[in-house]
Amino acid sequence: MTINSIFLMVLTGLQLGAIYALIALGLTLIFGTLGVVNFAHGALYLIAAYCAVFAAQSLGFGLAIVLVPIILFIFGIAMERGLIRFFYQRPHTDQILVTFGIAIVVEEVLKWMFGANNIPFALPSWGAGQVLFYGLGANVPAAIPGIRVPMPFLEGFAFFPAWRLLLIIVTAVTIFALFALLQFTRFGLVLRAGMRDPEMLRFLGVNVTIRFSILFGIGAMIAGIAGVFGGPVTQVSPTVGMALLVPSFLVVVIGGMGSMLGALVAALLLGMASSFTTGFAAAVGDPTAKMALTALQQIVVYLVAVVVLLIRPRGLFGKKGIFE
């Protein structure tokens, strides 16, 4: 296995981890602040992906990038005000049942409206193509199109899809913006105080309720960003939301319930594990061994979860008393 193939597997792992991270961030943000286990978060991703497809077709991809997260933000606030707020003090089992029910309803409605097959989600012209990474002394033909990025340790040159690289960058910017919002703004300060003692803030005249609604909307907006940029990668069909929810929820559990840092580390861990399993399977010459590794790629996420939780039952960064 060459250094080039390892480099591409790392990029693929980052791209897989980016999708898991965007969905898991919304999950852990809502749970860590509001104490709500939101199994409808995969449905929010699904709604965003469908909205992005039709917005891109009718208004252009640029406007879809702006409009879809705003639509999901509004949808998230309406969902929190209309239903979720009634379950804040209810057991987590009740929260799981009602949000899982929402996810099933959304999936079935979309099947009824658009069918069960994939809907094409074409990339914009500015997002298509490849990024070319080249090593020192590499002779790159001038006729090869695309962005060129020097990587001194590479041998020759390697290609990576531009849109998948953009997904990694957008995820990093989103994570930084969310961290800055929670750590360096008055809004974030009030939220963190409200997590500890919401009644005291109400006595001081702070409207905690509306801030919690906005926070739920922000979690939904992150799912909207994931739907816009992840839709062309994962494809758009009614089952994709549930397919992504399961590994994303495992990311939250592996990282530690309510821990944003844990969710990010776990997303990278699962993304890398899945990418390297696929890469090793592709490099194996024996067809039987290749088939076995390909099958292992489907369950590697769960194997990682088992190992981590056996060593750290509360997750990598989980704290005592959370979800116990």
Image: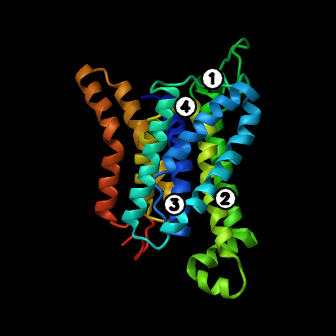
- Of the numbered discs in the image, which one, if any, rests on residue 233? 4
Quarter of image, res 253: bottom left
- Left or right, 33 with reference to 39: right
Q: In the rendered structure, which amino acid carries the disc numbered 2?
A: Leu
Quarter residue 153 falls in: top right
Q: Which residue is mark 3?
A: 28
Q: CA distance from mark 2 to mark 1?
A: 29 Å
Mark 1 or mark 3, which has the lower sequence index? 3
Query: Residue type at mark 1?
Result: Ala
Q: Quadrant of the C terminus?
A: bottom left
Q: Please report whichever mark, 2 or 1, sits nearer to the chain's N-terminal start.
A: 1
Q: Residues within 10 Å of mark 2 (few under 14, many from 20)?
A: some
Looking at the rendered image, the quarter that the N terminus falls into is top left
Q: Residues under labels 1 and 3: Cα distance? A: 31 Å
Secondary structure under tag 3 reads helix
Give the CA separation, mark 2 to mark 4.
23 Å
Q: Nearer the viewer, residue 299 or 58?
A: 58
Distance between the Cα atoms at labels 4 and 3? 23 Å
Residue bearing the label numbered 1? 122
In the picture of the structure, the residue carrying the numbered disc 2 is 178
Above or below for 252 versus 121: below
Task: Give the residue at x 39% y 70%.
Answer: 91
Quadrant hosting residue 294: top left
* Mark 4 or mark 1, whichever is nearer to me: 1
Question: Which of 209 and 134 lies nearest the eye of the viewer?
Answer: 209
